[in-house]
Image (cartoon, helix red, strand yellow):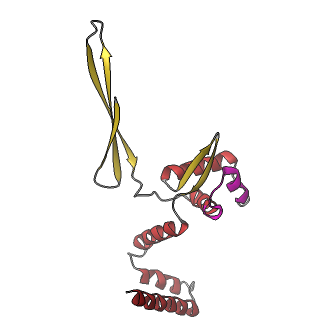
């Protein structure tokens, strides 16, 4: 008999307990059971790990295509293209981290995004602002203005977008 029990613990980790019962007969034909319990920690789907530069570059291509095979992603890669095996390893790591899903067709895997580009940008932009700008979007915009990366026209356009969003949210409520 075999079954698996899953429990959630505090934090972003999930513990999976595998409990196995075995019926064992000894030389006198008496049987007894043994219980084997294994505990392994696995990442929860709710806490996605940050992507490396290479992983993010590969994800950009996966988002662009939507779904495909390693060779399809390799065709869209900019020069110099990584070796096929390197890209395959990166995509597999993305799958392990929960960013990509795969479907097996005989001996080949088709990959597709498990998270949209918009979701990723939203999640990691908020982390970026929290970590580098004390959780202040005002400080982020001020930094762009000080570095002359944001023109007065662009700032006006941002303010117009904010006004439009406020008007639409007022209409919807």
Where is residue 101? Give x, y as percent. 54, 52
Q: Quadrant of residue 1?
A: top left
Question: Which quarter of the image is occupied by the C terminus?
Answer: bottom left
Q: From the viewer's perspective, is 37 left or right of 57?
A: left
State the image coordinates of residue 167 (x, y, percent, origin top left).
Answer: 44, 91
Horizontal side of residue 173 vs 118, given as left or right: left
Residue range highlighted in magenta: 63-77
Residues 157 and 140: in front is 157
- Total of numbered circles in the picture? 0
Quarter of the image holding residue 72? bottom right
What is the chief secondary structure element of the magenta stretch? helix
Q: Residue at x 56, y 86 (%)?
A: 150
Judge from the rendering whether residue 73 lies leftward or rightward of residue 142; answer left or right. Answer: right
Position in image of residue 40 (x %, y %): 36, 40
Which residue sits at x=66%, y=45%? 85
- The x and y percentages for residue 164 are 48, 90
Work out which residue is located at the far top of the displayed protein and give it.
Answer: 28
Identify which residue is drawn at 62% across, 59% down.
Answer: 62
* On screen, residue 2 above or below 86: above
Q: Residue at x 64, y 40 (%)?
A: 106
Q: Is residue 139 above or below residue 102?
A: below
Please, is residue 141 above or below residue 61 in the view? below
Residue 119 in magenta stretch: no
Above or below — where is 4 with respect to 83?
above
In the rendered structure, does residue 70 fall within the stretch colored magenta? yes
């Amino acid at each position: 008999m075999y079954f698996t029990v899953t429990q959630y613990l505090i934090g972003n980790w999930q513990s999976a307990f595998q409990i196995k019962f075995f019926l064992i007969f000894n030389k006198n034909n008496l049987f007894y059971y043994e219980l084997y319990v294994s505990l392994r920690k696995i990442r929860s789907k709710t806490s996605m790990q940050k992507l490396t530069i290479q992983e993010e570059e590969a994800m950009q291509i996966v988002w662009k295509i939507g779904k495909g095979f390693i060779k399809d992603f390799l065709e869209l890669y900019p020069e110099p293209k990584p070796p096929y095996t390197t890209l395959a390893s990166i995509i597999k790591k993305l799958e392990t981290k929960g960013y990509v899903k795969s479907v097996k067709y005989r001996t080949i895997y088709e990959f597709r995004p498990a998270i949209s580009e918009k979701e990723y940008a939203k999640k990691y932009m908020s982390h970026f602002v929290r970590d580098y700008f004390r959780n202040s979007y005002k400080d982020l915009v001020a930094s762009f203005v000080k570095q002359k990366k944001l023109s007065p026209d662009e700032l006006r356009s941002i303010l117009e977008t904010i006004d439009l969003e406020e008007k639409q949210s007022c209409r919807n409520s």
